[in-house]
Image (cartoon, helix red, strand yellow):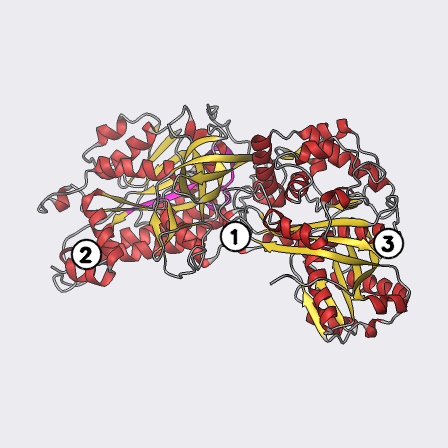
Amino acid sequence: MKRQSYDGVAVAVPVSVPYVRYSIETAHWWIARALKELCDRAGIVHRDLDGLSVSSFTLHPDTGVGLTQHLGLTPRWLDHVAMGGASAVVALRRAARAVQAGDADLVACVAGDTNHVDSFRKLLGSFSRFAQDASYPYGFGGPNAAFALLTDHYMRSFGATREQFGSICVDQRKNALGYPNAIMKKPLTNDQYMNARAISDPLHLFDCVMPVAGAEAFLVTREDIAKDLGVSFARPLSTIERHNAFPDDPIQLRGGWAMDVEEFWAMSECTPHDMDVVQTYDDYPVIIAMQVEDLGFCDKGDGAAFLSTRDTTANGDFPHNTCGGQLSAGQAGAAGGYLGFVEALRQVTGQSLGLQVTNAQRALVAGFGMINFDRGLCSGAVVLEGA
Amino acid sequence: MTDPIAAPPRKDPQQRTRSPLLPPVPRSRAALQMSAAAARGELHLQGCLSCGARIYPPRDACPTCLSVRLAWQQVPDRGHVIAETTVRTTTDAYFRERTPWRVGTVRLDTGPVLMTHLHGDVEAPGPCRVRAYLDKSGNAVLMALPEQETPNMADDPELRELTATPKHRRVLVTDGRTAVGQATARALSDAGASIVFIGVATPWLPFDGQDILAAIPNAEIVPLDLTDATSVRELAGEIGGKTDILINTADHVRPGGVLSRQGLTTTRDEFEMNVFGLQRLAQHFGHGMVGRGADGVNSAVALVDILPVYALANWGAWGAHSASAAARHSVLQCLRGEMRAGGVRVMSIFTGPVDDDWRQPLPPPKVAPSAIAQAVVYALENGTEESFVGDIAKDVLARWQVDPKALERELQG
C-alpha cells in the first residue's frame, strides 16, 4: 500500500530554551519552560493542548503520564518517545498522523533534559541491558568508546581522515558563533581540532558533544489552525523511521536510512539537490558522514570527503547544521534529537535566531539514536518545506 | 611485545594504600551464566537450540528465530579484531585510574561480534583468540589475546587485572609438612613469587621433606598451626600486611563415615583443621588482603584452597571427610562474596584422592602433589575460580553437572 501524504499537517513554533552546562533544575522544569514559550508564541494557553509528545532521559521516575499532572495538561493523545537522537522525527511522524486522523488538533512535541553535575555518569550506568552486560565492563568509555570503534573501522574501510572530520566540526563552530544559544562561544581552528586531547582514539575532544541542560519544542497541528493562530509553518513532505537496521553487519558502516532512502525521496518528490538546508544528527562526525551517504548526497564512503570539500557554513554552498549542531551548541539529552529539527523549522519559516540561509525553502532533517550495545539503533529523516 | 613489569620497590608506610575499586558490577541474569563458565576458564556463548544461531550479547530469545530455547555452549576462540580504540576518559572510578585502556571489536570466526579487552600485543586489525576471564567484580569479561604466546605476555596491565599471577607477589602456603604443601611452595617460587612463606606446625618436630623446603629459593619457614587461633593471629600480625596470595594446602584426612566411627573425636579434628582452620585464616588475613586489593604490582589477589572434590557429593567410604569438605566448599562460597569487596579472588582447587600415606590402600588413579601444585599456579596465572585436578575430580565434576542427585547415588557404591 502506498503511504499516505502528510497533506494538511502544519509544523510550527520552533522553540529552543537556551542551554546551560549544568543545571540544578529538573527535566520537568526545562520541559515546562519550553511548553510555556510554545504556548505564548502560539497565542494559546497550555490547557488548549490536546496532544503531547515527550522525550527525556531524566524524567525518572515519571513518564509523559506523570508530566500531564505535573504540568496541568489534559491531553487526549499522549506519546513518550524514548529514542534519543531520533526523537524529533519519530515524534513528528506520530503527531502528524494523529492530527490528520483528528485524534488531536494541537500536539506539543517537546524534549528536555537537565544536566546535574553527576547525571551523565548516572545515565550511562543504566542505559541499556546490552550496554550493562557487554560494553560498559570494557573500559566504561560510554558512547565515546562505542563511536570510537565505529569511527576507527569507518576510517580504515574508506580512508576517511581526521582532517576531513575536522573540517565538518570547524564549519559547525562557525555556524554556532552566529547562534545565540550555543554553548561554545569561541572559534575553532583546524589546528585546535587536530591538536585536541584524545578521548578514545581516534576520537578527540572536538569530536565529542558536551552534555548540557536544555529543552526544545515544536507544535504539530492542521494548516487551517496554524493559519488561524497566525504562525508561520512548514509542511512535512516525507518521513522515514527504522530501528535495528542491518543487524547482520558485524559493525556499523551504515544506518537505517540506507534501507528506506528510495521511498523517502520518492515520497517527498524531491532529490537531495533540492535541499536548501541539511541538518544531520551530529553526536560524532562519523555519523554525519554516514547520513549524507545513506541519504544519497554522495557515494558510500565519500561522506567525510564530500563535506570537507564543501562550504558547510550557513552561508556556504551546502548549509549544514546551521546553529552549530550538538557539537557546538551542546547536547541537552533527548533535546539533542530535536535541535536539528527545530533549527530546520526556523530556517524554512524564516525565523532563524542566528545565520539565516538565504531563500531556504526545503530542509532535510535526519535523526539517529540509542547506542544499545555496539551501534545506533534508531534512524529517521524528514523533509520539511516552508509554507 | 609487552614490557616486563619491574619488581616493586619496598612499600613506603607513609604513603596511602590505594583503595580497591571494582569495575561495573551489575549484569543481567543471562550474563551471569557466562560468568559461571568463565569461572572455570571456559569461553561459553549462547547458542539457539532451535536454529543453531550463535548469540551475543546474552539474550533471553533468539534474534534469528525467536525461540527461547537457548543454551550456553563452549565455542571456538578464534576471531579477528575489526576495530580498536583506547579509552582515555571515563566516568567510572575503577577504569579512571587505569586508563589508557585498550578495547576492541572482535568478530569470532563462528560469527558473533564482541567488545573485548584488547591485549597490547594484538594487532588491529588482525587475528586473535578470545578468552573469558572473571574481572575483579567477579563477572565474566572477554579479552582478545595474541594468537601465539608473546614475550612477557602476562605482564600486560589489562591482563594482569584479570589474573592473580604470582610474579613479584608474596605467597603464604599454609602447610609445609605435607607433600602437597611442599610441591606447591616449590611451584610458586618457580612461578616468580618474590617470597614464599611456608607455614609449619610444631616446627621442632622433624618431618619428611624438610630438605625439599630448605632447597626452595626465596622461601621462609614460619610457625603456623591452623587449629590454633593464637598461632594464626600471631603470624597474621607479622606477615598479614605482605601476604598477596594465601594458599591453604592443609587437609586433615581419615577414612570412615558417620556410623563407622565411634564418637566425634576424629570428625572434630577434621572440621577443626579443614573448616575452622580455613575460617581462622580468612578472619586474620582476609581483612588485610581486601584492603590491599589494589596496592600496586604486589596487590593482594587471591585466597586459594585445595579441597577434595567430594565437597560436591559425599563419598561414603570417606564420608566424614567429605562432610568437612562440603562445609569448606560452602565457606569458600561465602568468602568469595566477602573478599570481592577488594577484588580478591577466592579460588577452589578440587582434587581427587591425593597420592599420599592416608590414601595408600586406594587404587589409582590418584593425584600427585606436583599436579596439584601445577594446578594452583595455572589457576593463579589464569584467574580461574574453580579448577579440577586429576581424572577423578574431572569425572566427578562431569557427573555432578549432569545430575548431582545421581552422583550421590553413584558415590554410595
The spot of residue B55 in percent (x, y) is 42, 50
Helix, strand or loop under label 1: helix
Q: Residue at x 84, y 51 (%)?
A: A348
Q: Residue at x 87, y 42 (%)?
A: A178
Determine which of the numbered discs, if any, sits on residue B266 in the image. 2
Residue B101 in sight in this render: no
The residues tagged by marks 3 and 1 sit, at their Cα atoms, a distance apart of 41 Å
Determine which of the numbered discs, if any, sits on residue A349 in the image. 3
The residues tagged by marks 2 and 1 sit, at their Cα atoms, a distance apart of 53 Å
Image depth: mark 3 or mark 1 in front = 3
Helix, strand or loop under label 3: loop
Determine which of the numbered discs, if any, sits on residue A9 in the image. none
Of all chains, the one bearing label 1 is A
Image depth: mark 2 or mark 1 in front = 1
Residue nearer the viewer, B364 or B299: B364
The spot of residue B402 in percent (x, y) is 24, 57
Q: Are marks 2 and 1 in contact (CB under 8 Å)?
A: no
Residue A199, above or below A359 = above
Residue B72, above or below B9 = below
Query: Does residue B195 belong to the magenta stretch?
Result: no
Give the residues in magenta.
Answer: B289-306
What's the amino acid at mark 1? Phe
